[in-house]
Amino acid sequence: MSLRDILKDKVVKDNLVTDCVQLIEHQVAAKGGLSGLGLKATYGVVKGIGPAYIPGAIERLLPEALNALDPIWHEGLDAGDPVAYLSQHQRRAADCLLSTTDARIERTNNGLVKASYNKLRESVKGDVEAAIPGLANILATRVLVA
């Protein structure tokens, strides 16, 4: 079963979106320093587009993101622990996720979102890497029980 297959179950998909929103909220809130201020401000601008924008964006990105992570997840299954494996390969996993968001941003017509993303793209790679263990746990909760 591919990671993307879990999206066929609406309840699992909705819970996955909610979990990912919470993970992002936590990661942004925990960010400190000047870079944290910039990230929080930019996240606030994007969130200000509408209350459903972030969950909707996650829902739209999930199929591509799960496809990108699928090879690493399956390598982890073969190794016996996909959560630990994904966490140990967080740089590679972050690159996979960022490649999907890069492609999506290139196609967007929303200039505010595009400008905000491009402004922070390089600085958030470490933040995405740091979120991979949390994402791995979310996937284990949603995939391994689906």
Image (cartoon, rainbow, N blue to C red):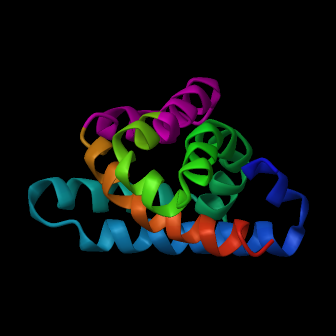
Q: Quadrant of the C terminus?
A: bottom right
Q: Provide residue 128's location: percent of width, then percent of height.
A: 37, 50
* Residue 98 in view here: yes
Q: Magenta span covers which residues?
A: 96-122
Q: Is residue 62 left or right of residue 129?
A: right
Q: Residue 114: where, in percent of width, then height?
A: 48, 34
Task: Count the numbered circles shown.
Answer: 0
Residue 77 in picture, x, y percent from top left: 62, 53
Identify the residue shown where x is 44% and y is 68%.
134
Residue positioned 30% across, 73% down in the render: 29
Asked if the stretch drawn in magenta spans residue 55, the answer is no
Left or right: where does residue 131 sit relative to residue 124? Answer: right
Q: Nearer the viewer, residue 135 or 112?
A: 135
Closer to the camera in the image, 18 or 55 = 18
Residue placed at 56% from the left, 58% from the top? Answer: 80
In the figure, residue 63 lies in which quadrant?
A: top right
Q: Relative to 89, is 27 above or below?
A: below
Q: Residue at x 55, y 50 (%)?
A: 76
* Rendered location of residue 45, percent (x, y): 42, 57
User: Is any atom of residue 45 visible in this view?
Assistant: no
The answer to whether 25 appears left or right of 11 in the picture is left
Tell me the chief SS of the magenta region. Answer: helix
Vertical position of residue 141 compared to residue 48: above or below:
below
In the depicted view, which residue is nearer to us: 29 or 68? 68
In the picture shown, does residue 73 fall above or below 20? above
Q: What is the quadrant of residue 133 in the picture?
A: bottom left
Would you say residue 99 sits in the magenta stretch?
yes
